[in-house]
Amino acid sequence: MSRLTGVLERAFGRPRGALGRFGGTVMARGNAEQERRAVAEAGIEPGQRVLVIGPGPGVGLQLAAAAVVPGGHVIGVDPSAEMRGMAQARCAAEIIDRVVALRAGGAEDTGCADGSIDVAISVNNVMMWDRPRGFAELHRVLRPGGRLLISVHRHVLGVSAEELREDAISAGFQRAEIDLRPRRFSSPAVELNARR
Protein backbone atom coordinates (compact mmCIF):
# COMPACT_ATOMS: atom_id res chain seq x y z
CA MET A 1 0.00 0.00 0.00
CA SER A 2 1.45 3.36 -1.00
CA ARG A 3 1.74 6.18 1.53
CA LEU A 4 -1.04 8.14 -0.22
CA THR A 5 -3.33 5.09 -0.26
CA GLY A 6 -2.70 4.62 3.48
CA VAL A 7 -3.55 8.26 4.20
CA LEU A 8 -6.75 8.06 2.14
CA GLU A 9 -7.72 4.80 3.87
CA ARG A 10 -7.31 6.39 7.34
CA ALA A 11 -9.25 9.50 6.26
CA PHE A 12 -12.08 8.00 4.21
CA GLY A 13 -11.96 4.21 3.83
CA ARG A 14 -11.77 3.10 7.45
CA PRO A 15 -11.57 6.45 9.26
CA ARG A 16 -9.44 6.62 12.38
CA GLY A 17 -7.53 9.21 14.35
CA ALA A 18 -7.12 12.83 13.36
CA LEU A 19 -7.21 11.92 9.65
CA GLY A 20 -10.49 10.09 10.21
CA ARG A 21 -12.03 13.14 11.88
CA PHE A 22 -10.81 15.32 9.00
CA GLY A 23 -12.29 12.82 6.52
CA GLY A 24 -15.58 12.89 8.43
CA THR A 25 -15.75 16.67 8.12
CA VAL A 26 -15.13 16.43 4.38
CA MET A 27 -17.75 13.67 4.06
CA ALA A 28 -20.34 15.68 5.98
CA ARG A 29 -20.06 18.48 3.43
CA GLY A 30 -19.33 16.51 0.28
CA ASN A 31 -22.01 13.86 0.77
CA ALA A 32 -24.81 16.02 2.23
CA GLU A 33 -26.72 16.30 -1.06
CA GLN A 34 -26.43 12.55 -1.67
CA GLU A 35 -27.52 11.79 1.92
CA ARG A 36 -30.60 14.05 1.54
CA ARG A 37 -31.57 12.36 -1.71
CA ALA A 38 -31.08 8.84 -0.30
CA VAL A 39 -33.27 9.55 2.71
CA ALA A 40 -35.95 11.13 0.49
CA GLU A 41 -35.82 8.23 -2.01
CA ALA A 42 -36.11 5.68 0.79
CA GLY A 43 -39.64 6.91 1.47
CA ILE A 44 -39.27 6.79 5.25
CA GLU A 45 -42.49 7.32 7.20
CA PRO A 46 -43.21 8.25 10.82
CA GLY A 47 -43.17 5.26 13.13
CA GLN A 48 -40.80 3.18 11.01
CA ARG A 49 -37.59 1.45 12.09
CA VAL A 50 -34.66 2.48 9.91
CA LEU A 51 -31.15 1.06 9.70
CA VAL A 52 -28.37 3.33 8.43
CA ILE A 53 -25.27 1.39 7.45
CA GLY A 54 -22.06 3.37 7.80
CA PRO A 55 -23.61 6.70 8.78
CA GLY A 56 -20.17 8.32 8.98
CA PRO A 57 -20.48 11.77 10.56
CA GLY A 58 -24.25 11.35 10.88
CA VAL A 59 -25.80 13.65 8.26
CA GLY A 60 -28.12 10.98 6.85
CA LEU A 61 -28.71 9.55 10.31
CA GLN A 62 -30.08 12.88 11.50
CA LEU A 63 -32.25 13.25 8.38
CA ALA A 64 -33.66 9.74 8.86
CA ALA A 65 -34.40 10.53 12.52
CA ALA A 66 -36.44 13.58 11.49
CA ALA A 67 -38.42 11.41 9.07
CA VAL A 68 -39.40 8.68 11.59
CA VAL A 69 -40.87 10.91 14.29
CA PRO A 70 -43.20 10.45 15.95
CA GLY A 71 -42.87 6.87 17.07
CA GLY A 72 -40.00 5.64 14.91
CA HIS A 73 -36.43 4.62 15.61
CA VAL A 74 -33.15 4.83 13.69
CA ILE A 75 -30.15 2.55 14.25
CA GLY A 76 -26.75 3.51 12.90
CA VAL A 77 -24.00 0.89 12.60
CA ASP A 78 -20.45 1.96 11.77
CA PRO A 79 -17.13 0.16 12.31
CA SER A 80 -15.25 3.44 12.89
CA ALA A 81 -15.12 4.80 16.45
CA GLU A 82 -14.28 8.26 15.04
CA MET A 83 -17.35 8.25 12.81
CA ARG A 84 -19.59 7.02 15.63
CA GLY A 85 -18.25 9.84 17.78
CA MET A 86 -18.99 12.44 15.10
CA ALA A 87 -22.47 11.00 14.50
CA GLN A 88 -23.12 10.94 18.25
CA ALA A 89 -22.23 14.65 18.51
CA ARG A 90 -24.41 15.56 15.50
CA CYS A 91 -27.38 13.49 16.74
CA ALA A 92 -27.03 14.18 20.48
CA ALA A 93 -30.62 15.42 20.89
CA GLU A 94 -32.02 12.48 18.90
CA ILE A 95 -30.02 10.05 21.03
CA ILE A 96 -31.28 11.65 24.26
CA ASP A 97 -34.84 11.40 22.88
CA ARG A 98 -34.20 7.69 22.09
CA VAL A 99 -34.96 8.20 18.42
CA VAL A 100 -31.38 7.28 17.40
CA ALA A 101 -29.08 4.49 18.61
CA LEU A 102 -25.49 4.06 17.43
CA ARG A 103 -23.35 0.97 17.67
CA ALA A 104 -20.27 -0.69 16.23
CA GLY A 105 -21.05 -2.88 13.25
CA GLY A 106 -21.46 -2.95 9.53
CA ALA A 107 -23.59 -4.36 6.74
CA GLU A 108 -22.39 -7.88 7.50
CA ASP A 109 -23.19 -7.68 11.22
CA THR A 110 -25.92 -5.19 12.13
CA GLY A 111 -26.98 -6.67 15.47
CA CYS A 112 -30.64 -6.30 14.42
CA ALA A 113 -33.29 -8.99 14.88
CA ASP A 114 -34.83 -10.88 11.97
CA GLY A 115 -37.47 -8.84 10.13
CA SER A 116 -37.15 -5.89 12.52
CA ILE A 117 -36.29 -3.11 10.02
CA ASP A 118 -38.59 -1.26 7.60
CA VAL A 119 -35.91 0.61 5.63
CA ALA A 120 -32.14 0.17 5.27
CA ILE A 121 -29.95 2.91 3.78
CA SER A 122 -26.29 2.94 2.79
CA VAL A 123 -24.46 5.93 1.29
CA ASN A 124 -20.93 5.57 -0.06
CA ASN A 125 -19.82 2.46 1.81
CA VAL A 126 -21.02 -0.59 -0.15
CA MET A 127 -17.59 -0.76 -1.80
CA MET A 128 -16.12 -1.72 1.60
CA TRP A 129 -18.58 -4.55 2.29
CA ASP A 130 -18.20 -8.23 1.84
CA ARG A 131 -21.17 -7.81 -0.53
CA PRO A 132 -22.66 -11.33 -0.42
CA ARG A 133 -22.56 -11.30 3.40
CA GLY A 134 -23.81 -7.72 3.61
CA PHE A 135 -26.75 -8.27 1.28
CA ALA A 136 -27.65 -11.51 3.09
CA GLU A 137 -27.63 -9.73 6.45
CA LEU A 138 -29.78 -6.86 5.19
CA HIS A 139 -32.24 -9.32 3.65
CA ARG A 140 -32.43 -11.06 7.03
CA VAL A 141 -33.12 -7.91 9.09
CA LEU A 142 -35.62 -6.26 6.72
CA ARG A 143 -39.28 -7.15 7.18
CA PRO A 144 -41.13 -8.62 4.17
CA GLY A 145 -41.74 -5.69 1.83
CA GLY A 146 -38.99 -3.66 3.53
CA ARG A 147 -36.93 -1.36 1.38
CA LEU A 148 -33.18 -1.18 0.72
CA LEU A 149 -31.60 1.93 -0.76
CA ILE A 150 -27.90 2.07 -1.60
CA SER A 151 -26.27 5.14 -3.10
CA VAL A 152 -22.59 5.26 -4.03
CA HIS A 153 -20.29 7.39 -6.20
CA ARG A 154 -19.80 5.45 -9.43
CA HIS A 155 -16.05 6.16 -9.45
CA VAL A 156 -15.50 4.37 -6.10
CA LEU A 157 -17.93 1.46 -6.53
CA GLY A 158 -15.31 -0.94 -7.89
CA VAL A 159 -17.84 -3.15 -9.70
CA SER A 160 -20.47 -2.48 -12.33
CA ALA A 161 -23.90 -1.25 -11.29
CA GLU A 162 -25.31 -4.47 -12.78
CA GLU A 163 -23.07 -6.57 -10.49
CA LEU A 164 -24.42 -4.63 -7.50
CA ARG A 165 -27.97 -5.37 -8.66
CA GLU A 166 -27.15 -9.07 -9.18
CA ASP A 167 -25.71 -9.29 -5.66
CA ALA A 168 -29.00 -7.97 -4.26
CA ILE A 169 -31.06 -10.41 -6.33
CA SER A 170 -28.80 -13.32 -5.32
CA ALA A 171 -29.51 -12.48 -1.66
CA GLY A 172 -33.27 -12.68 -2.32
CA PHE A 173 -34.19 -9.05 -2.92
CA GLN A 174 -37.05 -8.33 -5.33
CA ARG A 175 -37.64 -5.47 -7.75
CA ALA A 176 -33.98 -4.46 -7.59
CA GLU A 177 -33.57 -1.41 -9.81
CA ILE A 178 -30.51 0.66 -10.65
CA ASP A 179 -30.54 4.36 -11.44
CA LEU A 180 -27.73 6.82 -12.17
CA ARG A 181 -28.16 10.22 -10.52
CA PRO A 182 -26.06 13.17 -11.67
CA ARG A 183 -24.04 14.92 -8.99
CA ARG A 184 -22.85 18.50 -9.13
CA PHE A 185 -19.11 18.10 -8.53
CA SER A 186 -18.37 14.41 -8.99
CA SER A 187 -19.23 11.29 -10.94
CA PRO A 188 -22.88 10.20 -10.94
CA ALA A 189 -24.28 8.30 -7.98
CA VAL A 190 -25.30 4.71 -8.59
CA GLU A 191 -28.58 4.12 -6.76
CA LEU A 192 -29.93 0.68 -5.99
CA ASN A 193 -33.55 0.43 -4.85
CA ALA A 194 -34.75 -3.03 -3.82
CA ARG A 195 -37.50 -4.68 -1.82
CA ARG A 196 -37.26 -7.59 0.61
Image (cartoon, rainbow, N blue to C red):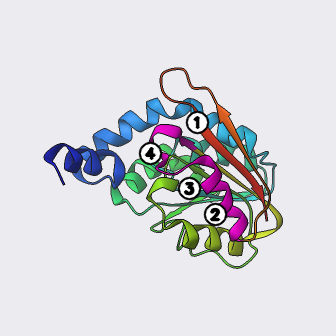
What's the distance in space between the residues labelled 1 and 2, CA to CA? 18 Å
Q: For residue 139: magenta? A: no
Which comes sooner in the sequence, label 2 or label 4? 4
Q: Which mark is residue 95?
A: 3
Residue flagged by tag 2: what amino acid is it? Asp
Which comes sooner in the sequence, label 2 or label 3? 3
Residue at position x 67%, y 60% in the image: 166
Cβ atoms under marks 2 and 4 closer than 8 Å: no
Residue at position x 76%, y 74% in the image: 115
Locate the N terminus and report the quarter of the image it occupies.
bottom left
Q: Residue 32: x, y in percent?
A: 53, 32
The one of 166 and 81 positioned closer to us in this rendering: 166
Q: Mark 4 — residue? A: 57
Q: For residue 156: magenta? A: yes
Which comes sooner in the sequence, label 1 or label 2? 2
Q: Residue furthest top?
A: 184
Which comes sooner in the sequence, label 3 or label 4? 4
Mark 2 or 3: the one toward you: 2
Write the start and end of the magenta stretch as one range.
152-171
Q: Can you say whether 98 is above or below 116 in the image?
A: above
* Location of residue 163 by image quarter: bottom right
Q: Is residue 68 left or right of residue 153?
A: right
Q: Mark 1 — residue? A: 189
Secondary element type, mark 1:
strand
Residue flagged by tag 3: what amino acid is it? Ile
Residue at position x 58%, y 43% in the image: 60
Cβ atoms under marks 3 and 4 closer than 8 Å: no
Which comes sooner in the sequence, label 3 or label 1? 3
Cβ atoms under marks 1 and 2 closer than 8 Å: no
Q: Mark 2 — residue? A: 167
Residue 169 visible, this angle: yes
